[in-house]
Image (tube, rainbow, N blue to C red):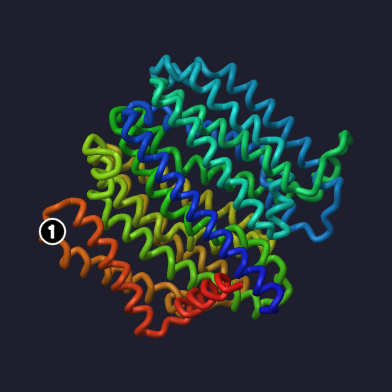
Amino acid sequence: MSEDLKGKTAKGLFWGGLSNGLQQLLNLFFGLFLGRILQPTDYGLIGMLTIFVVVANALQESGFTGALVNKKDLNHKDLNAVFWFSTLMGTALYLILFCCAPLIADFYDEPLLRDLSRVLFLGFLLSSSSTAHNAVLFRNLMVKQRAMTYLFAQGISGTVGIILALNGMAYWGLAMQSVTHLAVQTILLWHFSPWRPTLEWDFRPLRGMIAFSSKILLTNLLTHINNNIFTVLLGKFYKPQVGFYTQANKWSYMGQSLITGMVSNVAQPVLAKVNDETDRQREIFRKMLRFTSFVAFPTLLGLALVAPEFIVITIKEKWLPCVPYLQILCLWGAFIPITTLFSNLIISRGHSNIFLYNTVAVGLLQIILIFAMKSLGIMAMLSAIVTLHVLWLFIWHYFAQRMIGIRLRDVLKDVFPFLGISILCMGCTYLITQSIENIYLMFIAKIIVAAALYASIMYLTKATVFRESLHYLFQHKKG
């Protein structure tokens, strides 16, 4: 890896990690307040509408961010066409869903959703005008600017949510938090991006991107549907459980997105830059795979370990029913950053069709599993889904092997040591701390013991990724 690209990658990972870490701390801070103030039913109402929001977001973006990042000769006309397409698409989708709000309320048999959905859906309408600006920052590895955008948006929107919740607005606080976040994010993306749109209604540049972007769009749509179909099912058939699942999913997502966001900020653009050098690309991919495994497994398995104490201490015992959901979602979340890295590799090679086919296949299997196991209960369905996604990593590897020649034994060599050590550390921590009766001491002890064990094993085994991470952190601090 050239020094310039290596430096940009390290800088991107640093800022991505710092940004995602601070975002999750803010999420934690605001989540604690809101979780204590609000009830499971408040989260349940927002959870029922999530699938409409994420699908609309995917449609207005239409996969053009990835297409713009991969385009060799990007120019103003390309960005301008994407800007006007996304803006018009976002407006049209909002008008459609605004009119469909009564139907959504009828589907869930919940009248409150009619007005709530019309407010919540304002978010994707506002964000539709920032697709091109976000692509410019992403393509040019302006990770610091994106980090500042997301942090300010998180801080301001979280404050709005808490103020409204404290004033008795309950689920409206959650809705306005989401809308405010996207509004602030859009303003700051415009501020940091050097590009500006012009009043030229020329959509011809989209033709050169549509073959690539349409596959990403379909993939994103199916991914969002797959990720949220479970919530839809709960809202329809197990309404009392929606709030608990939504809360568990929120904390699990915070954990895995910390790593996924850090890696995704740099993976696709960096891998795309060395697309013509297969050996070099394979080397970069393996380094990213080791780093991802090194961080993901102890983080998510650690969250599963402390889940009972964490939930009771932070958002009170009323949320205890969400603990089993959180623990199994953490197991799934530990592998999501690795899946994301494989998908970034495939997209960087220009094979958005393979990305699409994989998502379609795993999505259809997931839906089949959900309905086949519906009568066995929520935990049985979740266990089956998690198993499916973990095993599907071998399918992702098959395509990666065809593209860059990476062997399965090399992937296992890069991944399994960190998985095994993480399981060992969490198991030993559980045994060491199980006799502690005070819940606060138990929580602190689990974190300290697990972190100390993991760091010690990394040090004693002279893990390269551990030494390189420490070296970069201290070097950056001195700089």
What residue is drawn where x is 39% and y is 36%?
A: 231
What residue is drawn where x is 54% and y is 37%?
A: 156
Q: Is residue 400 left or right of residue 380?
A: right
- Amino acid at circle 1: Ile
* Residue 229 location (% of width, % of height): 43, 38
Q: Residue furthest front?
A: 478
What residue is drawn where x is 41% and y is 21%?
A: 167
What residue is drawn where x is 57% and y is 27%?
A: 121
Q: Is residue 15 left or right of residue 109?
A: right
The C terminus appears in which quarter of the rendering?
A: bottom right
Q: Secondary structure at mark 1?
A: loop
Q: How many marks?
A: 1
* Residue 327 location (% of width, % of height): 29, 52
Residue 105, relative to residue 180: is it above or below? above
Residue 287, relative to residue 241: is it above or below? below
Query: Within 10 Å of the Cα at label 1, are there few (<14), some (14-19), or many (20+) other Cα atoms?
Result: few
In the image, 416 versus 356, the foreground residue is 416
Q: Is residue 401 visible in this depiction of the protein? A: no
* Residue 269 location (% of width, % of height): 68, 62
Q: Quadrant of residue 449?
A: bottom left
In the image, 73 versus 347, the foreground residue is 73
Q: Quadrant of residue 237?
A: top left
- Which residue position is annotated with label 1? 436
Q: Is residue 195 visible in this depiction of the protein? A: yes
